[in-house]
Each structure stands twice: as structure tokens, then as C-alpha cells.
């Protein structure tokens, strides 16, 4: 099956032809670890985790290497640690920076795992690659693509003729349209920092240009070179990184004599209820916020996959409810046909764990996840247990089920549902709807609180309320209403 991917560098969809099918390599820019991952941070993780899964399916799990870095040296991390110190936290600033980085990396891995993301083959920390960064900078200075000035090392942008090819803009256009740091030690306003000085209380390393720390852009080039080689297959990230970060990565790596990445992929940004997510609008929240509110990680993931990665994505409560119902329906279909974790294990052991060719074909067309999900609705209509194998396979391929014990949970929930409970819950939901129509908000809130107390998860989508028993479902709360 040929995978087609939209290559930002050539602005068209291309057949993906790996440099070496036995060693497919992908690099994705990871987080700067100063705080919890907000919802928008999860989009590239889910997009490229899905691609990672597809590549593993196509080329074999042992033939794909995925690298996603952690930027653990950054002014935002320093500022967060300084605020802790000023609030009375014990330890040196360097200790607090390390503590914050370790804490945030742990949070990130936990939260991304909760939305079904596999850990990459390598997750390098920038601070472990300082020597490699210094070597690259020395190489660039030696080739006259960079220069030292006042404790800084800077890349000479106009020395690279193809600068701007990725984003499709000339250097002069970029200067006119972008905010660039003007500094007296720069030869040109567009020249960017490869190395900068550190004060005594900031993280720093010895270098030919004095004690300092790397600029952001050189980090990814050095880590990608060390872990994936001078040329690799795919480089991904959000489209907010296209300029200047990815443009600068290409320039400095190419000028070092490296081929760097063949295919560049960028996901679009995220909105919330049709608006840009921001703290000022009160619609800013983290992945952990949603998880703590009881939104399952697989539901968060499915909401993301309902929109193609190159289109802006809108997180809405309606979509959350739609995704929750979809997943519940798919799991219910499998459970009702006798599927269990043991069944899945047996299918894999016997070689009967097979994918649907049409599902894989649609997904292989530039990660058309929405089209693949449409195909899953068709697969769910199979009338035999054997016919549902491709549905189960698709759920795992998209990362929507990472632990098949979910089938036991579904079965247990069905077992815990007394015969009378369904009719009582249906009646309460109708009464709640009538109260809302009559603007009797007090009664509507009372009924909502009653359903919540019983662990009933209610979703309102396009004016229609649906429900599923939540993980804390307790029908005894409703027993007096039967």
C-alpha cells in the first residue's frame, strides 16, 4: 500500500518513498517543558503518533524510528523556576530548573499516554546534546555561514540562497512582515542566534564563545543528526513552527552539508468553540483539565481525528459528545459479539488479526483520519464476530483502544445495569429536557445533579441527549425512582 503525504516543501501530495524501507526515520518537534501541555499541544502528538502507527503497520514495527525531543533549556523554564525561587522554594536556580523540567516531562508523558500516544523510540533532551550543538556551530562558522559577536554565535541568513523556500517567502518579505530581534551585534536583522551568553544564575556551558546556552533552532538539528543521520525521511510539527523554526533548521543543517529531511509535514492549529484558545477568552485548558473532568483520553483523541490534520480543528462539546457515543457504540458492538481481551489475544496469535484494506488505503491517503473513521462505521455493521476483526484492528491502529480490557469494563457495566435502570434514566433525561425547554433551570439542575450522582454521563448533541453509564455508575442512587 503506497502512503501519500502532503509535503510542505513542494506544496503537494507525494508518494512516500523512504530512503531505506528497512529504516524509516521521522523527527517531530516536541515541547518546551515549562508547564502542562495545553489542548493545542496535543494535536501534533496525536497526528504524528497516528502516522507512526501507520508506518509501523506498513513497514514493520522494527523498521521505523520515531524521535521527538524535549526542549529543556529555555528562558520560559528559567522564568518559571525563578518564580518558584522567589516564592520561597529551596535550592539553587539550576536545581529548580532541573526539578521543573523533570516534573513537566513526567506530566507530558503521562498526559500524552492518556490520549493514546505511544512513546517515540527516542525522546532526547536538548541539554544532553550541548557538545553536538557546539560542533555544528563551529562547522557553520568555519564555512562562513555563521559568525561570533559579543559572546553570541549567529547564523548568517543571507549566506543560504534557498532560505524561505519552505515557507515560500523571501528574506526581505520576512523582515517586512515579521518581528525580528534587532541587536547591535547582528550583521543583518534576520540573522538568528545559535548561541547566547548566560548570566551566573542561568544554565550555561563552556563554549568557544564563552559560557552560554544554545539558541532554540540549533537544538533540533543537532539531535536529529545524531539520532537519525544526515538525511532522514519525515520532519513534522505544527504549522506555527514552519517559520522561523523549521526554516532555520533547514538552513543551518544544509549549510553543514546535511541533506536533512525529505518530507515536511505540518498540522493546522486548534480552536475552541470556534475561537482561538486563549486565557483572556477563558477557553484555555490543558489536556489534564479534560482528563480530570472525566473526559476519557480516547474520546479526546477521537475528537482530534475527526478533522483532517491539515485543516483547523475546533474542539466543541458537541464533538466531544459525538466521539464519546461513537466509541461506546463500537466497543458495545464488539462486546455483544463475544469479544474480550482473550479473544483479541487469540486473533493476534493465530494470524487472524487482519486489517481492512479499504480502511488502510483511506488512512494512507495523507492521513485521512475522518475518511478512515467513516469506513469504521461500515465495518461496525458486520453481522458476525469474524466480520468485526477489521473494526477491532482499526480501533487499535488509530490508537483509540490501547488496552483491550475496555471490553471487560463494557461487559461489567452491562452486568451492573438493572433492568429498571434504563427506563428510569431515559425518563429523567426527558424530564430534564422538558425543564430546560420551560426555562425551569432549578429543576433542570436538580435532575442533572441526580444523574451525575448516579454516575450517568449525559451528552447533548444537536439538541438530542444521549447517555452511557460512567466508570462510577451507581444505580442504587436512582432506586427510589423506579
Image (tube, rainbow, N blue to C red):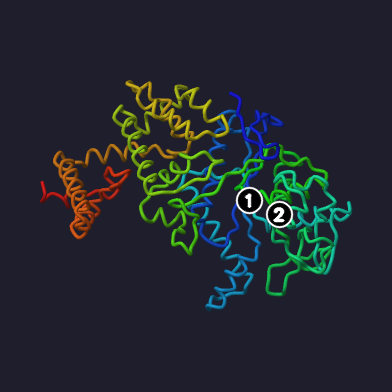
Q: Is residue 235 above or below residue 285?
A: above
Indicate the position of residue 388 as horizontal and vertical percent values.
38, 25
Q: Is residue 292 above or below residue 475?
A: below
* Number of numbered discs on residues: 2
- Asked whether disc 1 touches disc 2, contact meaning CB atoms under 8 Å apart, the reply is yes
The structure residue drawn at horizontal position 52% and vertical position 28%, both measured from the top left corner, is 362
Judge the density around disc 2: few (<14), some (14-19), many (≥20) Cα neighbours within 10 Å: many
Q: Residue at x 60, y 70 (%)?
A: 79
Could you tell me residue 55's position as x and y percent? 59, 33
Nearest to N terminus: mark 1 or mark 2: 1
Q: Residue at x 48, y 31 (%)?
A: 371
Q: Report whether residue 21 is seen.
A: yes
Residue nearest the viewer, comparing 27 with 467:
467
Residue tagged 1: 69
Q: Element type at marker 2?
A: helix
Quarter in which the N terminus is drawn: top right
Q: Nearer the viewer, residue 466 or 393?
A: 466
Tell me the CA gap for discs 1 and 2. Answer: 9 Å
Vertical arrangement, residue 244 with respect to residue 462, above or below = below
Amino acid at each position: 500500500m503506497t502512503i501519500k503525504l502532503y509535503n510542505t516543501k513542494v506544496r503537494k501530495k507525494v508518494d512516500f518513498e523512504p530512503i531505506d524501507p528497512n529504516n524509516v526515520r521521522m523527527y517531530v518537534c516536541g515541547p518546551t517543558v515549562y508547564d502542562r501541555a495545553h489542548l493545542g499541544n496535543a494535536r501534533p502528538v496525536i497526528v504524528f503518533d497516528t502516522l507512526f502507527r501507520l508506518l509501523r503497520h506498513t513497514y514493520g514495527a522494527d523498521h521505523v524510528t520515531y524521535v521527538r525531543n524535549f526542549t529543556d533549556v529555555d528562558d520560559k523554564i528559567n522564568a518559571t523556576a525563578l518564580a518558584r525561587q522567589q516564592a520561597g522554594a529551596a535550592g539553587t536556580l539550576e536545581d529548580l530548573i532541573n526539578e521543573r523540567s523533570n516534573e513537566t516531562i513526567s506530566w507530558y508523558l503521562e498526559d500524552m499516554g492518556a490520549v493514546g500516544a505511544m512513546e517515540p523510540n527516542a525522546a532526547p533532551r536538548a541539554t544532553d546534546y550541548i557538545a553536538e550543538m557546539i560542533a555544528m556551530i563551529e562547522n557553520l562558522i568555519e564555512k562562513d555561514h555563521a559568525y561570533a559577536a559579543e559572546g553570541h554565535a549567529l547564523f548568517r541568513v543571507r549566506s543560504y540562497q534557498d532560505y524561505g523556500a519552505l515557507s515560500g517567502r523571501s528574506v526581505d518579505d520576512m523582515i517586512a512582515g515579521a518581528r525580528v530581534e534587532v541587536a547591535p551585534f547582528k550583521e543583518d536583522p534576520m540573522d538568528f542566534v545559535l548561541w547566547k551568553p548566560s548570566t551566573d544564575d542561568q544554565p550555561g556551558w563552556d563554549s568557544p564563545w564563552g559560557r552560554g546556552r544554545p539558541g532554540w533552532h540549533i537544538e533540533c538539528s543537532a539531535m536529529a543528526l545524531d539520532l537519525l543521520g544526515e538525511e532522514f525521511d519525515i520532519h513534522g510539527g505544527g504549522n506555527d513552527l514552519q517559520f522561523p523554526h523549521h526554516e532555520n533548521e533547514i538552513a543551518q543543517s544544509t549549510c553543514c552539508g546535511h541533506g536533512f529531511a525529505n518530507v515536511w509535514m505540518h498540522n493546522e492549529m486548534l480552536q475552541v468553540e470556534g475561537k482561538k484558545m486563549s486565557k483572556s477568552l477563558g477557553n484555555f485548558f490543558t489536556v489534564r483539565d479534560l482528563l480530570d473532568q472525566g473526559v476519557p483520553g480516547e474520546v479526546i483523541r477521537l475528537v482530534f481525528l475527526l478533522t483532517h490534520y491539515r485543516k483547523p480543528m475546533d474542539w466543541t462539546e458537541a464533538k466531544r459528545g459525538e466521539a464519546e457515543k461513537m466509541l461506546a457504540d463500537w466497543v458495545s458492538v464488539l462486546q455483544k459479539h463475544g469479544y474480550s481481551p482473550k479473544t483479541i489475544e487469540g486473533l493476534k496469535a493465530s494470524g487472524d488479526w487482519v486489517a481492512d484494506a479499504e480502511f488502510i488505503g483511506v488512512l494512507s491517503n495523507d492521513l485521512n483520519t475522518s475518511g478512515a473513521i467513516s469506513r469504521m462505521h461500515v465495518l461496525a455493521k458486520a453481522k458476525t464476530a469474524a466480520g468485526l476483526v477489521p473494526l477491532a484492528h482499526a480501533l487499535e491502529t488509530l490508537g483509540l483502544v490501547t488496552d483491550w480490557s475496555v471490553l471487560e469494563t463494557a461487559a461489567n457495566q452491562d452486568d451492573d445495569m438493572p433492568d429498571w435502570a434504563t427506563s428510569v434514566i431515559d425518563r429523567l433525561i426527558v424530564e430534564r429536557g422538558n425543564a430546560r425547554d420551560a426555562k425551569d433551570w432549578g429543576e433542570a439542575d436538580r435532575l442533572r445533579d441526580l444523574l451525575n450522582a448516579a454516575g450517568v454521563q449525559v451528552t447533548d448533541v444537536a439538541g438530542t441527549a444521549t447517555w452511557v453509564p460512567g466508570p462510577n455508575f451507581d444505580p442504587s442512587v436512582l432506586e427510589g425512582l423506579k
